[in-house]
Structure formats: C-alpha cells, structure tokens
Amino acid sequence: MSSVDESVLEKAINKMLSEGANYAEARYHEIRRTSILLINGAVMGVEQSVRSGIALRAIVDGGLGFASTTSTSTEAVEKAALRAVAAAKTSAAGVKNPIRMSPARLGRAKYSVAEKKPLEDIAIGDKIASLLEEYRALVPGRNGFKVPNITMIYTDSVEYKVLVTSDGAYVESRVPRVAAMYNLAAVYGEKRANRFGELGASGGYERLKEFKLSEKIQDDINSLYISLVEAKSPPRGKLDVVLSPEIVGLMVHESAGHPSEADRVLGREAAQAGMSFRATYKEETIGSPAVTVVDDPTIPGSFGFYLYDDEGVAARERVLYDKGKLAELLHNRETAAIYGTESNGAARAMDYLSEPIVRMANTYMKPGDYSFDELIEDIKHGIYIKKYMEWNIDDIRWGQRYVGLEAYVIENGELGEPVTNVALEVTTKELYSSIDAVGKELVFYAGLCGKGEPPQGVPVWMGGPHVRLRGVTIR
C-alpha cells in the first residue's frame, strides 16, 4: 500500500543524525478526501483533494525542531531535514528543560482498515445520489413548525502514513473514514432553535448506510418540534437527573479527556485551549465508584481508530478515571519522559504540516448493569435530559454547564411531560460524585476534536451509557 519511496525517509533520518540529532523522525502523511455539500436538497459543492507531504522532527541537545515539505524527492526531503536540525539547534540554545523521548514499545508493523465497499470504487455521482435519497426521506414541517434550512455534508477520506524513527519504529497504516454532518434551523412562530449532528466511523462506503442518516436527522427534527412546540419550562433546584449517552459522551470528552492530557496539565495549552484541574487537584477521588472513564484508539470501526500513534508507540486502552479515582494521563513520548513513565500512545498529528501532540481518540464511560427503566424507577421527581442544545466549560475543565434541548420530567418512576432549556450546572467533582447508577447500553458519537496552535482537528468518538445523578442543581 506504499505510495512513497521508504528509502527517502531513511535518508532523511540519516541526514538528521549526521548533522547532530540525538533523535530523528520522518513521517509521510497523505489524506485523500471527498466532500459533498447539500443545502435544502440542492448540491452546493463537491470537493476532492489530496493533501500529502513529509513531516520531520529532530532533537539536538534537548532542543526540538520541526520541518515539512510537500515534495518526496530525496533532495527536497534532505533540505527539510537540515531545516529541522537547524531549528532544533536554535531551540537548544535557550531551552531550560531539555526535551527527551521516553522509552516505549515501538512498532514495526503494517496495518489497514478493511472496507466492504472501498471508497475509491464508488463514483462521486453515486455518493451524491445517496445523500439526496437521505434528504428526500425527511418530513421537516407540521402544524406551523418549519425547518427552513437543512444543511448536510458527506465526507470520506483515506489517511495513509509511513512513520520511521531513529530508535527503531516503522509503522505503515491506511485508515479510510466516512462521516456525515448536518445542521438544522427550526422555526415556530417567534421561537428559533438549531441542532447540529455528526456521525463518523472508520471503514468503507458501507458505513453510510449503517449511520441511518435520514432517521437520525428526522429524530432531531422531532426533538426540535418537541422543544419549540410542546415543551414547558422545567422544574428547578436540587433534583435527581438521568443523562443520555449523548450528554455523557460530551461530558467525559470535555471533563475527563481534556483535563487528562499531560501537555495541558503541564500548561502547554494554556494560551490556546486552557489548562487542567489535574495540575493542582490534590485529592485521589474525583467521582463515585460507579465511574470509570477510558480512552481507547483500538476499537474496531471507531472514528478515532489507530493501532500505533504518530511516534510509533503501540496503542492501548488508557484508564483516565478508575472507579472514581484519578488514574492515567494521556502521554506522548515527551510528556512521558517528564513524568518518568512510558508513553501510552496518545501522540497524533492532523497532517504532514503538524507535529504530533497529545490527543484523545475514543473516550467513553464504561457501562454498568442498569436498564433505563431501572435508572428512573425510584425517582419521585426528577429530569431526564435526552439531547443538548448548548454546553460550556471553563478553561481548567472544572465548572461546566449543559443545556437540554429535549428533556422530560420524571414523576414517580415514569417519564412525564417534555421540558426544554434545562440547565445542569456542576463542577467536575460534583458531576462524577453524584453518579450512583450506570446503564448497560454503550453508545458512541463522532466529532472532530480541536487543539493546538496552529489548530489541529482530529477524528474522535465520545460516548457512554445512560447515567443517574442524585441531587444535582437544575437552573
């Protein structure tokens, strides 16, 4: 599956070492992408692109240098290698804490995600026809309720990489992915509401049918109808609350995944995306024993799938919160060296213009053994929040707020009337400590997680089961 002369990467490694590098890394990174934009059933744009090049990193006397080139010729790549070494030497002159790469289980492997329907075998016209078919299945308006704007975006990509490092890693990978995004703008009289959704997985074109896209969009249209037409104001105060997997997935991504990124804990993200409460939090406990949150890149078919990270480290499940206790941080080889541990394979780069930084992959709360009926059966007066319309969280990932789009009162163990604008406001510890029961069903949601400067967006899954919270504040 190689589309680059691997000897070029080896020559770049040798050039960097000969110029004084203590560590050298070369990564060929290619992304072939197709995108289709549909607005209200009209095809507004089609894009097909190839983005490829070679990224190079060198460490010289504790200084790190990065360079990249679109050319795969030996001459151009060796010139870029010299730029990486020069940048590392410049950095080394002023570095206070020399950069080191921790020992790690480095891979020598080739792998590819299987496709039942290879993406390149599907004509662009067939992809457009499938998207139009999904749109025509929708029933957007009724009883004065309208959805004047339905935007749909189909994207597929094939990410191909070859990574070589001076300390023995060689990893060649090919990961095809399919994604669908949509945005709905709804109107009922003077009321307005929007809903955004995203579906994504690794694999071939067969994934689009598996998404059941029109069903998902129609369900969100129905949620908008309930919120704008039928829902009442919610009860306020201290209540028992059940959260859906959609809310739980967002919650663990934002308040377990991001604060567990080691570079954020070290303050590396302070100017761009904030810091982490784990930098100063002195307690071992963050939640109840019912709470275990993990991040696992190796889930087959996942949007954030990989088997080796972009430093050649074997991927594995990382336990972030273990039965209510703080556990692992997400590490690349640099942060692992600072903490005196091994990398757990969390280094990812968006493309050849980007260097690997600490990233999540597929972050979720481990399921428990409760059915949904069991979660609500002993709640006398509470709230079930099924879908959110907005959320926010502070820059240390401690104080957070989730506002429900579709929600229901729980009365004497049964779902009652719909309510909307349900605002759950909690700290991270209050949130996880209030969970006393976790559902059986695990559901994942796709997203593009943004981080870094220049910004990098990478595919992720976030998910979980239904959970029950006792005595939390609804505003």
Image (cartoon, rainbow, N blue to C red):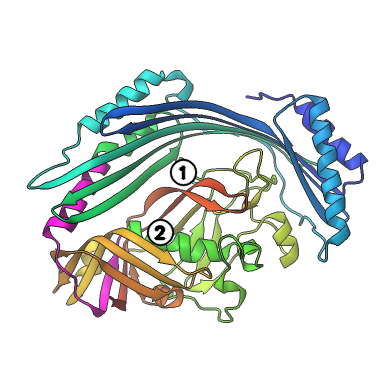
User: In this figure, what is the number of numbered marks?
Assistant: 2
* Relative horizontal placement of residue 173, taking residue 135 as reference (left or right): right
Contact between marks 1 and 2 (CB within 8 A): the answer is no
Checking the image for residue 302, the label placed there is 1
Instruction: Give the percent coordinates (x, y) of residue 132.
Output: 28, 27
Front in this rendered view, residue 267 or 437? 267
Instruction: Judge the density around disc 2: few (<14), some (14-19), many (≥20) Cα neighbours within 10 Å.
Output: many
Instruction: Judge the density around disc 1: few (<14), some (14-19), many (≥20) Cα neighbours within 10 Å.
Output: many
Q: Amino acid at mark 1?
A: Ser
Compared to residue 225, the image places residue 251 above or below, namely below
- Is 344 contained in the magenta span? no
* Residue at the farthest left position: 143
Image-quadrant location for residue 365: bottom left
Compared to residue 224, the image places residue 434 above or below, namely below
Instruction: Give the percent coordinates (x, y) of residue 389.
Output: 30, 58
Image-quadrant location for residue 217: top left
Which quarter shows the N terminus?
top right
* Relative horizontal placement of residue 13, taking residue 447 as reference (left or right): right
Instruction: Give the percent coordinates (x, y) of residue 47.
Output: 46, 27
* Residue at the farthest front position: 190
Compared to residue 338, the image places residue 131 above or below, namely above
* Relative horizontal placement of residue 41, taking residue 446 as reference (left or right): left
| Region rendered in magenta | 217-244
Front in this rendered view, residue 163 or 473? 473
Q: Is residue 459 visible?
A: yes
Sequence-first disc among 1 and 2 = 2
Q: Amino acid at mark 2?
A: Leu
Label 1 secondary element: loop
Question: Residue at image x 21%, y 41%?
Answer: 148
Checking the image for residue 250, the label placed there is 2
Question: Residue at image x 83%, y 33%?
Answer: 79
